[in-house]
Amino acid sequence: MITILLFAHLGDQAGKSTVQMQAAGMTAGEMKESLSETYKLKGIYTAMIAVNEEFADESTVLKDGDTVAFIPPVSGG
């Protein structure tokens, strides 16, 4: 099982900030696509990805027990 953390507006759009998914062997990019389709997450494609608290790219292969965070860009001043 993989734990997915959705930050900021992604969690708001999904209606939850944490999701559990069977996704071992999937890449982070494939997970991004799956979450976009399942939860209609409009801004997920611009989100940074972190796997186990380390920034990762979309080609990172996920393992059982991983924690994957999707962090959208923020602005402010």
Image: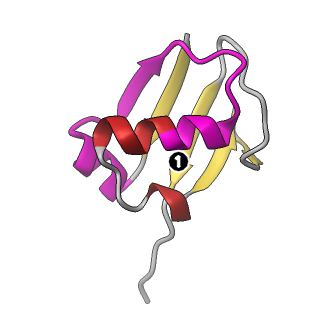
Q: Is residue 6 magenta?
A: no
| Snapshot quadrant of residue 54 | top right
> Badge 1: few (under 14), some or many (20 or more) residues near its Cα, within 10 Å?
many
Residue 8: give x, y in percent of width and height: 36, 56
Identity of the residue drawn at 45% across and 80% down: 75
In the rendered structure, the answer to whether residue 4 lies left or right of residue 42 reads right
Question: What range of the chain is rendered magenta?
Answer: 8-33
Q: Is residue 29 above or below residue 9?
A: above
Identity of the residue drawn at 33% across and 35% down: 38
Identity of the residue drawn at 31% across and 58% down: 9
Q: In which quadrant of the rendered image does the N terminus lie?
A: top right
Q: Is residue 24 above or below residue 7?
A: above
Residue 44: give x, y in percent of width and height: 46, 55
| Snapshot quadrant of residue 28 | top right
The disc labelled 1 sits on which kind of residue?
A: Phe
Q: Secondary structure at mark 1?
A: strand
Residue bearing the label numbered 1:
70
Q: Is residue 31 magenta?
A: yes
Residue 19: give x, y in percent of width and height: 39, 25
Identity of the residue drawn at 61% across and 37% down: 30
